[in-house]
Image (cartoon, rainbow, N blue to C red):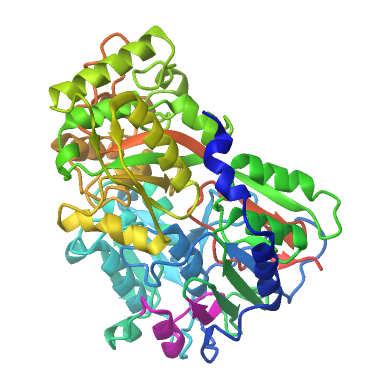
Amino acid sequence: MSRHRFLNLRTLLPIVSAILLIVAVACGSSDTDTEQAASSTAVPAAATEIPAVTGGDSKYGGNVRMSAYADTKDWDPLGSASLSSIQAYSQLYNQLVQFSTGANTTEIVGDLATSWESSNGGQTFTFHLAENATWGDGVSVTADDVVYALGRYMDTENSMGRSGLFRNYTVPESEGGIKKIDDHTVEMNLSFPSGAFMNFLALDYAKVLPKHILESGVDLNQAEGIMASKAGSGPFVLEGYQRGNGYSVSKNPDYFKEGRPYFDSIEHFIITDTGTLVAQFKAGTLDMMNGGFSNLSPTEYKQLDADTVGTSNGHIIANSLGGSRNWGLMMNRKAEKLSDPRVRKAIYLALDRAQLNEILEDNTADTPCALWSMGYSFEECATFPGMRDKNSEGGKADLAYAKQLMADAGYPDGFTVKYDARQVGNYPDVCSVVKQQLSDTLGIDGDIMTHESAAGYALYGTSRAGTGDWELACQGEGMTVLDPDALLGGVYLKGGTRNYTDWEPEIARTAFEAQKVEQDPAKRQQLLKDYEDFLVPTNPDDISQGFEDNHWVTLYWGQFFWLTHEDVKGFNAPATVQYSFKHEDLWLDR
């Protein structure tokens, strides 16, 4: 099976369309954007960190053009789990703390908090807030805003998304999980000491929003509401938004962090077509991506980097973020044909991961361990049923057993399903390969439906309260932080960002709770291995063991890349794709 068989549509793009889109970016889109009066978003002052300068002296000014891989789904962080959304609203608000933009991007530094300390054996955190932070309407940012905003994310009646991941560690708000000490001091209390708590609190998703504006009834999930109420607090102010086209921001003149930001303005252009994206970078009409994800393949990233070295329009650097991209096949366990765990295990065993890696990732992806080598190692996982070479004796046994499972479930000749994929990344290509493999091996066939990004999320969400309007779907989950809690919380717990059917057998919660409080690394790893034994087959000598129940098939762990022009300074690649979107420490050396 040739890689080009699935990617040929990406290379047959009309040249004229690409040129017209390049011109559109070069000229901007102010004539069509829904423009609103600029709001000077006065923000809560956070601890100021010296930006990492990568050459020359930092400079102020410039309009920066960034690409966005998809339109935003949300403007309010509550329950938000969309990467394209956080890339849009992150620059408008602040968190209590954030990950550093300096050389060590895993270090946690202040944002709204100027300092903090822990007590009570690591179960109590006290945060001291900047006193010069204001909202765009001139109202001061205080502890009331912090308690109200984070309290929304902690409320178990609300979807956890990624903004509420820290609530896995806090006691309920009603029991003192978060409380105001004074106007500029906030206390948070945990149910147990945890090193992971601060990592999740530092994610861009955990934004502080204005209490007085939310309580007045303004819908901050709409761009118009943000602009009209001057709700922002971050380094940039939302100026315009046109659905499907892009959004623009300008420098916040009243930003509480002295000397930030450097850019005068940023234009974000939504570009889903790979040919157009590459052409615009080569033409010099784009300065950087607004995050570490696009629709390009690893080879295309690296080729663009190589092709632009020494060119007149400048070098486009492909900054690697590492292999924390969990690409998978979602199986709607509520759909009739997929309700039997035997069918889902058959699918798991039949898929050829090596072929998927070759066709879709140019053999750059890591072995698809269910728990990303945090339990079993990549080397161990490569020997497991379903992951081993399909041409080996073990691989042939896997396929034979998968066919037997299908027959036992009443589908000896397979069945027809619907495949769904959002029109971002390589999701449609992933579904094409998966569909062909399952058709050839198990007789599972069907049509592939593609959806605009936000529409795809809405479709998958139909299975939370009901059966759902989808069956098999190709989707990814970018790790938020490099910790088992992030992976388990995102995929294997009820309410998880990629657990749309709210799958959670008793062992899932038990395993999560046990490993998250274990302080001994070796013991924690063993707990993860024990859970992995449930999720997938891990015994090469007994295919019948493992995959007692699961809703997700990890296809591979891929790399992320973040494109930046060589003139963009102060950039350091984050450890994962889920943070570093405020752009306040970046500057143009032009």
Q: Is residue 553 magenta?
A: no
Residue drawn 31% across and 11% down? Answer: 397
Quadrant of the snapshot with the C terminus: bottom right
Q: Position of residue 232 (x, y in %)?
A: 47, 80
Q: Is there any visible trace of residue 112 in the rendered image?
A: no
Q: Is there any visible trace of residue 563 in the rendered image?
A: yes
Q: Position of residue 15 (x, y in %)?
A: 69, 60
As drawn, is 223 to the left or to the right of 363? left
Nearest to the observer: residue 578 or residue 15? 15
Give the vertical position of 289 relative to 418 (above or below).
Answer: below
Q: Residue 540 lies in what quarter of the image?
A: top left
Q: Is residue 222 magenta?
A: yes
Q: Position of residue 471 (x, y in %)?
A: 25, 45
Q: Position of residue 36 (x, y in %)?
A: 51, 89
Magenta stretch in the rendered image:
220-242
Give the vertical position of 218 relative to 333 (above or below).
Answer: below
Residue drawn 51% across and 47% down? Answer: 576
Residue drawn 40% across and 76% down? Answer: 184
As drawn, is 76 to the left or to the right of 258? left
As drawn, is 384 to the left or to the right of 467? right
Give the vertical position of 275 relative to 361 (above or below).
Answer: below
Nearest to the observer: residue 513 or residue 88? 88
